[in-house]
């Protein structure tokens, strides 16, 4: 009766006619089953909430199923970037107030949603989380089953407290060896996506295991889980452990920091496949335009001059990431032809970065430091690219036109390569710019 | 339910930024979305697509964002059906939820060229290329997806189920709270 982590997480929330299924039936749930599950957290943002609210209003109920379970974050086109965006935000704001939502985060108190929610203690190991944003898979780092969906799915869940799911097969990604200097979680996930391809994990849960994962700090786990969708993955899962426990104690959920038992795959669990990665020889990676799967070692890339660098976002906007960038930028000057834009993930990240002198380091180097917002990541605002321009970005997607003009290019990388490239004015590795 | 239309053929990994660029996400008005559908990969599509036409694509159609604006833009542009070799997960769900018919049929997708005519029978899954004179069998839908299609999408389906009371337990005191009763 062995189950994978993905099977367990969904089975523990499985419903029949609106009630939890009995224990025996739960243990029988396997990949391929189509089930209805109770959800713990339902998330939307300023570009997906208006559609969800419109659909919700057609469902014939006045109130959401639980006002403490819905999380709305104004992070994409905010601070309101134009009249149309302001009107969308107004719809979301009105709804949050009308429904007395406890977890509504607006400009000034909001962060980029996938940095903010764990920090605010809104996701626990064992939870099922759905969000109207494809990078909702980020919370798999906490041992929750967390996945992105569209606005109509979110509307239905806001009303019912449930959603339908096909239980996914699991691809195990086993990581061994030791990460070298300036090689981190972003490089590892870019490499893995390069191996899998952008649809190599389509409909699958990706489960990250191995000694490298066991020692990976939470920031790195969030980075990796965040990009599960870029291989087509439904979820990016990490078993909850002591590192998770310490994180929860620092960012306690309302119901406490304890981890439910048995939140890892059983030893006899059936995986669809296993990929083994020895990270000892892994170099910093750069994903070339226009697919996240185009990962290459940074040393293999010829002279490519750049116009912009973006450091931050839901992928790499945590304190660890800004620290890494600051280590490289300290005492250096960003190249005169490069705009370097920093997108910290939350007000908490901002405060800590200020206290540690990180912001001073970045600003003295010539970076433009923003309030938390998704901004340029999806071509919204705060750093759009013109025709022919190139950016190195710590974001998660580089499809054609992603950050601006269809004739612009986005190269994905981790904070160290992004910072080094900002100094060099071309794609560069950290040791090229460090004395 | 049988559909017949002239097809527009695209390749693999057509992502949601290609289907509807983020710069247009300040609106959820279907007509505005339709006006910019496929803009960054085919500037001629939006102005030349006719109601009843079909989209044909390769692997992993609709990859990228969860934005429901993507299938909405396609639906609003008049496209009656999308036939692809495979669909990205979130796009697949979204299409069913909003009632946009989609069909998984790699052979039909690979053989078609822009301008061909396809006939699609959603009940049987038969796909016919009128120009090539070839018939294909698409992947069958899971029963649950057929239920969604018959209901007209997730919203009418969910509305009916909510009215039946099946979610009362999960909604807890939500309705009582709304009526002003309780703490």
Image: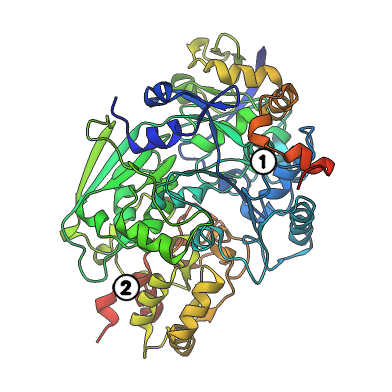
- Image side of residue A292 versus residue B20, left or right: left
Q: Which residue is mark 2?
A: A428
Residue at the spot of label 1: A158
Picture coordinates of residue A19 (x, y %)? 57, 26
Chain bearing mark 2: A
B75, above or below A279, in the image: above
Compared to residue B96, the image places residue A52 above or below, namely below
Alpha-carbon distance for marks 1 and 2? 46 Å
Q: Nearer the viewer, residue A165 or A373?
A: A165
Residue A398 in percent (x, y) is at 46, 55
Residue count near mark 2 (Cα–Cα under 10 Å), binned few <14, some 14–19, many ≥20:
many
Q: Nearer the viewer, residue B42 or A171?
A: A171
* Helix, strand or loop under label 1: helix
Q: Indicate which disc, 1 or 2, sits on the residue closer to the N terminus.
A: 1
In screen coordinates, is B9 left or right of A430?
A: right
Is disc 1 in contact with disc 2, using a CB cutoff of under 8 Å?
A: no
Residue A401 position by quadrant = bottom right
State how many labels appear. 2
Can the viewer see residue B59 in this picture? no
Outermost residue to the right: B179
In this image, A288 relative to B80: left or right?
left
Residue drawn at point x = 38 percent, y = 77 percent? A323
User: A348 and A75: which one is in front?
Assistant: A348
């Amino acid at each position: 009766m062995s189950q994978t982590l993905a099977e367990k997480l969904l089975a523990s929330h499985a419903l029949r006619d609106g009630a939890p299924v009995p224990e025996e039936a739960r243990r029988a749930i396997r990949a391929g089953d189509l089930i209805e599950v109770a959800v713990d957290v339902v998330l939307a943002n300023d570009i997906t909430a208006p559609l969800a609210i419109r659909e919700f209003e057609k469902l014939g109920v006045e109130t959401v199923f639980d006002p403490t379970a819905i999380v709305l974050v104004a992070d994409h086109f905010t601070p309101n970037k134009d009249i149309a965006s302001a009107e969308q935000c107004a719809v979301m704001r009105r709804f949050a107030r009308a429904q007395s939502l406890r977890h509504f985060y607006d400009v000034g108190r909001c962060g980029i949603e996938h940095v903010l929610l764990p920090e605010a203690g809104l996701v626990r190991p064992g939870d099922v989380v759905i969000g109207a944003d494809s990078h909702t898979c980020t919370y798999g780092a906490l041992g929750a089953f967390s996945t992105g969906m569209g606005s109509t799915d979110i509307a239905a869940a806001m009303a019912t407290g449930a959603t339908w799911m096909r239980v996914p097969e699991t691809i195990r990604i086993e990581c061994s060896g030791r990460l070298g200097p300036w090689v981190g979680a972003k490089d590892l996930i870019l490499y893995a996506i390069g191996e899998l391809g952008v649809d190599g994990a389509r409909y699958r849960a990706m489960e990250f295991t191995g000694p490298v994962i066991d020692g990976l700090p939470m920031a790195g786990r969030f980075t990796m889980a965040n990009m599960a969708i870029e291989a087509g993955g439904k979820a990016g899962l990490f078993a909850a452990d002591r590192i998770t426990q310490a994180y929860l104690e620092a960012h306690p959920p309302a119901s406490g920091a304890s981890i439910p038992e048995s939140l890892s795959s059983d030893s006899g669990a059936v995986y669809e496949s296993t990929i083994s990665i020895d990270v000892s020889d892994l170099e910093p990676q750069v994903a070339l335009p226009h697919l996240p799967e185009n990962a290459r070692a940074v040393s293999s890339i010829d002279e490519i001059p750049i116009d912009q660098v973006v450091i931050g976002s839901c992928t790499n906007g945590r304190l660890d990431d800004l620290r890494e960038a600051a280590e490289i930028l300290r005492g250096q000057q960003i190249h005169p032809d490069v705009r370097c834009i920093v997108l910290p993930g939350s007000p908490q990240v901002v405060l800590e970065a200020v206290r540690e002198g990180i912001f001073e380091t970045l600003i003295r180097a010539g970076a433009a430091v923003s309030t938390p917002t998704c901004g340029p990541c999806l071509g919204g605002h705060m750093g759009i690219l013109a025709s022919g321009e190139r950016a190195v970005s710590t974001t998660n997607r580089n499809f054609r036109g992603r950050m601006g003009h269809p004739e612009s290019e986005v190269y994905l990388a981790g904070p160290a390569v992004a910072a080094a490239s900002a100094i060099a004015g071309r794609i560069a590795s950290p040791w090229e710019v460090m004395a | 339910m049988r559909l017949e239309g002239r097809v527009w053929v695209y390749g693999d990994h057509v992502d949601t930024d290609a289907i509807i660029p983020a710069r247009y996400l300040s609106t959820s008005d279907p007509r505005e979305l339709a006006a910019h559908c496929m803009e960054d990969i085919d500037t001629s599509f939006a102005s030349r697509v006719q109601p009843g036409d079909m989209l044909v694509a390769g692997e992993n159609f609709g990859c990228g964002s969860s934005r429901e604006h993507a299938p909405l833009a396609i639906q609003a542009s008049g496209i009656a059906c999308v036939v692809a070799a495979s669909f990205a997960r979130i796009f697949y769900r979204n299409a069913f939820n909003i009632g946009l018919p989609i069909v998984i049929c790699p052979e039909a997708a690979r053989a078609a060229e822009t301008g061909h005519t396809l006939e699609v029978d959603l009940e049987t899954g038969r796909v016919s290329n009128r120009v090539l004179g070839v018939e294909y069998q698409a992947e069958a839908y899971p029963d649950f997806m057929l239920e969604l299609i018959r209901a007209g999408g997730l919203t009418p389906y969910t509305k009916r189920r909510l009215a039946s009371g099946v979610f009362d337990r999960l909604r807890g005191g939500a309705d009582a709270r709304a009526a002003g009763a309780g703490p």
